[in-house]
Image (tube, rainbow, N blue to C red):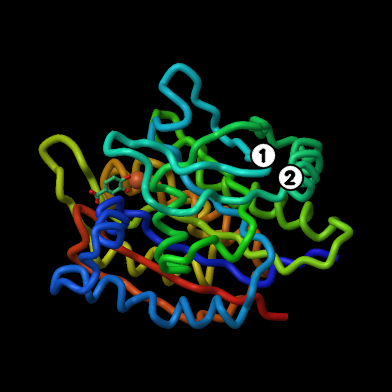
C-alpha cells in the first residue's frame, strides 16, 4: 500500500531560485539561506520518496485571472517549468504520477472536495523553488510529483480549516492506493511577507514562530485561525501559509520535528522550513 511517511514545508521565494540558477548561492547574502537546507538534502536522499504531493500556489502563471480554481490536482505525466517573464527556469521538467493523481482525484472528490482536474500545466516558482531547495540542481528530479495548486492569490482563498480537512482527505486517498509507494506531502509558501502597499516588507518573526509551534503541536488550533489574522499578523502574502495546513492534515496527530529553519532576510519574505515525520 502507499503510505505518507513525512511532510515538508518551505517558503518558495523566487529570488532563491534565481540565486541558484545564476550561480550566486555562495554569496554572503544567500549562503545562510541555502545552509538551512543542507540537512534537508541529506535527509531526503536517505528517505528516497517515490512521490511528492506538492501543495503550492500558482502566481497567475498557469492560471490567468480568467480562471482561478480554489483547489486543483495535476494528473499529467509531465509539467514543464513556467515562463514567469525571464524565460523558464533552467530546471528539469517535473514528472507526474498520473495513476496516483487520478486515484487521489477520484477519492478526494468523492469525499466532497472539489478539485479541478488538470491535464496540462506549467509550474512556476511556487513549485520549482521548493524542488531546488530540497534536491539542488540534478539533471533529472529524483521523484515523481503530483502538483496541488491552491488559490491564495485572489480573495477569497480557502480557509485554514478547509485546507486542514483536505490534507486528511488526501491522506485517506493515499492510504487506499494499492501500490507500495513512499509518499511525502509538501506545503509551500509563507511565512510572513507582504509585497504590496504601505506595509510592503512586513515580517513578523514572533508570530511566525508561534504559528509554527502550534502547527506542529496543536494543528486543530491553527486550523481555526481566520484569514484576517494572517493578513494582520503575516501580511497579505502570508496567507500562503494555509497551504502548510494541507501538509499537516495529511500527517498523524503526533509528529516528530526532524528539522526546523527560519531565516531573514531572503528577498521580501521570512523564510521558514520544517520537516515532520509521522509518529505512531
Ligand atoms: C516573494 C515571495 C513570494 O512568495 C512570491 O510569490 C513572490 C516574491 C519575495 O519575497 O520577493
Ligand atoms: Fe508566493
Nearer-the-camera pick, 122 or 152:
122
Residue topped by disc 2: 98
Q: Which quadrant of the picture is home to ligand 2?
A: top left
| Residue 26 visible in the displayed image | yes
User: Which residue is at 61% across, 54% downward?
Assistant: 145
Residue under the image location 30 percent in, 72 percent down = 34
The part of the image, by quadrant, that contains residue 278 is bottom right
**Residue 246: image location, x then y, percent:** 57, 53
Q: Is residue 211 left or right of residue 138?
A: left
- Compared to residue 93, the image places residue 213 above or below, namely below
Tell which circle, 2 or 1, labels the residue nearer the N-terminal end.
1
Name the disc covering residue 175, or none.
none
- From the image, tell me which residue sits under label 1: 76
| Contact? badges 2 and 1 (CB < 8 Å) | yes
* Mark 1 crowd level (few <14, some 14–19, many ≥20, 10 Å Cα): many
In the rendered image, residue 30, in percent from the top left (x then y), is placed at 21, 69
Say what secondary structure mark 1 lies in: loop
Which of these two is toward me, 177 or 45?
45
**Image quarter in which the C terminus is found:** bottom right
Q: Looking at the image, which residue sits at the far right? A: 178
Q: Quadrant of the N terminus?
A: bottom right
Amino acid at each position: 500500500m502507499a503510505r505518507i511517511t513525512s511532510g515538508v514545508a518551505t517558503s518558495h521565494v523566487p529570488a532563491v531560485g534565481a540565486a541558484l540558477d545564476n550561480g550566486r548561492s555562495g554569496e554572503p547574502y544567500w549562503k545562510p539561506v541555502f545552509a538551512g537546507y543542507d540537512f534537508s538534502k541529506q535527509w531526503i536522499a536517505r528517505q528516497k520518496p517515490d512521490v511528492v504531493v506538492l501543495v503550492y500556489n500558482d502566481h497567475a502563471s498557469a492560471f490567468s485571472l480568467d480562471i482561478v480554481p480554489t483547489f486543483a490536482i495535476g494528473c499529467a505525466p509531465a509539467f514543464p517549468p513556467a515562463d514567469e517573464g525571464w524565460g523558464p527556469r533552467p530546471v528539469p521538467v517535473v514528472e507526474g504520477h498520473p495513476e496516483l493523481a487520478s486515484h487521489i482525484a477520484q477519492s478526494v472528490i468523492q469525499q466532497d472536495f472539489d478539485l479541478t482536474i488538470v491535464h496540462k500545466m506549467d509550474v512556476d516558482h511556487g513549485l520549482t523553488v521548493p524542488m531546488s531547495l530540497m534536491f539542488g540542481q540534478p539533471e533529472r528530479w529524483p521523484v515523481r510529483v503530483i502538483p496541488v495548486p491552491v488559490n491564495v492569490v485572489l480573495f477569497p482563498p480557502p480557509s485554514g480549516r478547509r485546507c486542514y480537512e483536505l490534507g486528511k482527505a488526501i491522506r485517506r486517498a493515499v492510504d487506499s492506493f494499492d501500490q507500495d509507494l513512499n509518499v511525502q506531502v509538501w506545503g509551500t509558501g509563507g511565512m510572513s511577507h507582504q509585497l504590496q502597499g504601505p506595509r510592503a516588507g512586513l515580517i513578523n518573526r514572533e508570530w511566525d514562530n508561534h504559528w509554527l509551534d502550534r502547527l506542529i503541536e496543536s494543528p486543530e488550533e491553527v486550523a481555526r485561525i481566520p484569514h484576517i489574522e494572517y493578513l494582520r499578523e503575516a501580511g497579505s502574502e502570508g496567507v500562503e501559509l494555509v497551504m502548510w495546513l494541507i501538509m499537516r492534515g495529511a500527517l498523524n496527530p503526533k509528529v516528530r520535528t526532524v528539522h526546523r529553519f527560519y531565516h531573514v532576510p531572503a528577498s521580501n519574505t521570512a523564510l521558514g522550513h520544517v520537516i515532520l515525520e509521522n509518529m505512531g
